[in-house]
Image: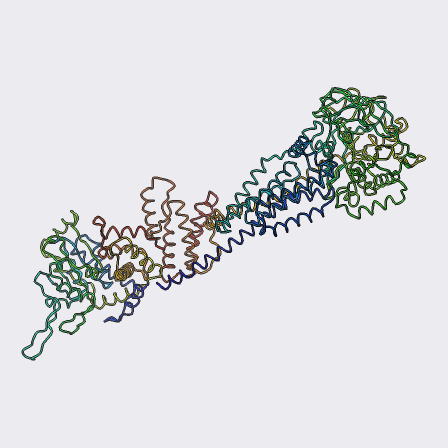
Amino acid sequence: MTDTNSTGDARTEPTAAGDHLEIPAVERLCADIEANVSRVIVGHEDVIEHVVIALLGRGHVLLDDVPGVGKTMLARSVATSVDCSFSRIQFTPDLLPTDVTGVNVFNQQTREFEFQPGPVFGNIVLGDEINRAPPKTQAALLEAMEEEQVTTDGQTRTLPTPFTVIATQNAVEPNRTYDLPFAEVDRFMKKLRLGYPEPDEEADLLGRTVGDHPIESLEPVTDRETLVAARETVSRVQVAQPVREYVTRLAADTREHAHIGVSPRGTISLLRAAQARAAADGREYVLPDDVQTEAPVVMSHRIKTADRDRDGDAIVADALERVPIE
Amino acid sequence: MSTDASGRADERPISLETDQVDGAGAARSIALLCVLAVTASYVSVLYGITQVVGGSLSLIALVAAMLVGATVLARLIRPWTAAALALAAAGIGFGYYLTSAGVDPSVVITAADTIVSDTVALATGLPLLQMVQVGIWTLGFAPAPVFLSWYLAMRGRYGLGVVPGGAALGFLVLTGDAGMLVTVTGTLAAIGAIAAGELERHGGSIQQADLLAALFALAVVLSLSVTVVPGQPAAPTHLAQGEPGTLEATLDTAPRQSGIAGAVDLSPAVRFTVESDQRSYWRTGVYDRFTGDGWVRTGRSSRYDEPLTSPPGSGETVEQTITAETKLGVMPVAPQPITLDGDVTRRTTVSRHGQPRPDTPLSAGERYTVMSSVVDPDPAALRTAGTDYPDSVTDRYLQLPESTSSEFRSQTAEITANAQNPYETAVAIERHLESSKDYSLSVTKPDGNVAEAFTTEMEAGYCVYFATAMTQMLRAEGVPARYVTGYTSGQQIDDETYVVRGLDAHAWVEVYFPEHGWVRFDPTPGESRDAVHTGRLEQARNDGSENVDTAESDDVPVSDEASAPTGTEPGEQPEPDPNETTDPDDPNESTPVTQGNETNETPSNPATDTSGGDSITDGSLVTITRETAALGLVALVGLAAGARRTDAATRLRRKLGLYWHGRRRDPDRDVERAFARLERLLARQYRPRRRSESARAYLHALSTAANAADSTPDKTPIDARAERVVDYYERAIYGTGVSRAEADEAIAIVDELARDRLPVVGRCTATADSQHLRSQ
């Protein structure tokens, strides 16, 4: 129950714009962004949609895949489409937290320390191969993700709005990576997988890269203010009592059947994602269908199973099959 | 959360406990009530008996005393002591019965086989009312089961407590005294007592009784459709003659009793011929105990062992030879028979009243000869006969049902006010009945005491009613009388031969006069009776029915003997002679008079017969007996319980709800209900929605499946309108709600879809409707 109350809090959260769009405008906006990104990314419509919805639902995305399937390209094209500042952090074993957050630099002229913002101060931040950096550095990013603020030398600075992290995680070379702590994975709204393109899609992909790369000519379809207003609209999408109860039941079911089930933060994320999906679908209210669509990508990575054969995906699939809607 | 849980934990035991106490208390009351009902069932049978023979107050007092005693002793004495007490009570009761029946109690030891055979006779269908001292027997019988069953019930041993009561009831069922209603009540109560006792013991809820009720009803209805209680033949199987519904069949329903029916028919078939030098009534049965709605012959019959006791006083010996013309279950004789001769005598039993009867029916053509001593009463002699009745006569022939009203007695006293002696009393009553009541075969049998109803309420009746009333009136005046059945003389075809038909069946009265014996009186108005009976015979002849005539009788007109129908009024004679008394005296003299009574009269009312037949049909169609009503009630309760058990009401509501939305309330709820109906429709046609499946996903899945499987003709694609209902439903449940108009639209869509699923008619109207909608 407390889970759903906090969505109410989220609704009243002040935003930079303080304005909001009508639902059809949000629907159109989503469609535009998706279409725009699709000009660069071949296939993967569902993943694009998930990323856009996470953007609207104030969530961060973890892309877990092998290198070279377009993770970075996806993040870049989304950032370009919404006309937001884009920064990229390449995580390496020797990356320091200050490399992420920024440092106080002594200005010789003013004889004062001046804050030099790190790459995290962007609207859309791509954290590439996040699992290559040691946990301390990861934590610097993860604090920013959760709090939407950065604290250096006792001083707290708010990050720009919107702030969305799209992190990628290298699924190969497990010996040379630091696994993300379970608590930190929880801070991503969604964990997505791109996967290899279909053969015909790949041919199309190759055709597009001949000559100029389409990312170079990609134009924004909206601006930052509109995006903020759309996020405000999404937060106002109605979540009826039956849906809240359904989400609670789903979470409870995973807790029952897994070693560690979905956390309350997970249920909040699920509701936000569902809200965003409802708005993207042109609805002012969340349906159980929205929850069901979002549940696999929002819940799976938050579940830890004792059984090696049954991962989070299976647990969530079972829960969706088992838990009654009303 | 934790406080919630602990709060609930606190409440739970309390609520459970109260439930249990309620359930157990109710179960105990029900069990006790059921045991009481078992007791009431057999006590009511005994009470009915004491109503006839007297002693009902004693019985009630005795039963009440036993109940109180058992209640008190239930806490004081141990079961074995109680059983011993009950046995002792039974022993004392039966000892008293044997003493008052004139049997030395020591006979129990010496004549054990007789007692055993008596018991067997009772248990194989001998009605209790045929026992001479049945009143005292009742008082001896009642205490033990009443005491024991109530004692055990009070101690909570319902199952055991039902046993003595059930045994008593079972015995009464075997004797044939317990009717269907009583038996059903007792049996149900017994099962109920055991079941409620079990419920109490296991702390079950009284709600669970619905299954029980359904099973009860099933048991009752099933068993009643096949059951046969011994000793209660539905049709007079023993008597070959007389189809059901005829007067004959009514008179001789069973070997030991004579019923009183409503409307009856007459059978024109020839039963037997008599060669006799004297005209007489041919008696076939004598009955002494009146139950209020029928007659019973008490006492044991013995094998024929000549000669029979001849009546006191002067009697003329008359020889008759009787030839059965059909199968004949009775032995008509002129009263009083003294010796019998013929093959049939080897299988003849004779009642205490001196009336022979064959064990197995006589076959057609079989004949026997009877020597009778016909009483020769001279009215003057009868007047002076006095009232010095022997005890054996007063004991038995003065019985009136206890319920006989004082009105009946005072009316009788009024009628006989001027009578100086029993003879004049009898003549006065006879005249009164002859003159004040009409003769009709189409009457409705009254409830309660027939004699009383006939004298006070009814306008008309037939011989059974006249004879019953007269017997009872005489007894009310202290004159010993008995009810006699048989046949009138019949058609005389030559000097000594009489042809007797089914329609000659008759009932009359015999009155006892000291020094003379039993003298016949016939209160039935002769003329109108003959009119009806002759009319029936002529009708049968015209119809060409078989067996209506013997070789000779058809040559002789029925009415030829009646060529001189002089007035039947005995007042013409110097003394007010009842024609019955003169009839056996001098047949030549009295022939016209008797004929007037028996067979002759112009067929003035040929419609009477058919109207009688009609009223039988009407009556059976309209009348609902108490038994039928009770059976219906049981079946109804069973159905209701079964319906409750199977949730039939809910199912019916659902089924109806498919086609009819019902009253409209809140738009959101209406849409919800509309969707529920749609869901049921789809579930019926495709598959039900899984609980984890959203409305939209369900519809989508069905559409996909239907489109994929378009080869199957019955799986028509999902109507697009269904999606609109789903939209409204989602909005009503999850969104901002729907407007009234949208709700109505949803309902209309579902109505239409539901009608599409109906058979042809519905489909046509649905199509018309949708066309109408489209044109709009």
Q: From this viewpoint, is residue B611 visible?
A: no
Is B109 left, or right, of B533 in this rendering?
A: left
Quadrant of residue B124 within the rendered picture: top right
Which residue is situated farthest in the left direction here? A108
Q: Position of residue A253 (x, y in %)?
A: 30, 54
Q: Where is residue B147 in the image (x, y as percent from the top left)?
A: 62, 46
Q: Position of residue B487 (x, y in %)?
A: 78, 29
Q: How is the image coloured?
A: rainbow
Query: Total of numbered circles in the picture?
Result: 0
Quadrant of residue B590 within the rendered picture: top right
Query: Is A293 drawn above or below residue B759 in the view shown?
Result: below
Question: Looking at the figure, which quarter contains the N terminus of chain A?
Answer: bottom left
Which residue is situated farthest in the right direction here? B574
Which residue is situated farthest in the bottom direction here? A110
Front residue of B336 and A65: B336
Front residue of B536 and A149: A149
Question: Looking at the figure, which quarter contains the C terminus of chain A?
Answer: bottom left
Q: Position of residue B284 (x, y in %)?
A: 77, 29
Query: Is B396 drawn above or below residue A263 in the view shown?
Result: above
Is B443 left, or right, of A129 in this rendering?
A: right
Front residue of B330 and B396: B396
Q: From this viewpoint, is residue B332 visible?
A: yes
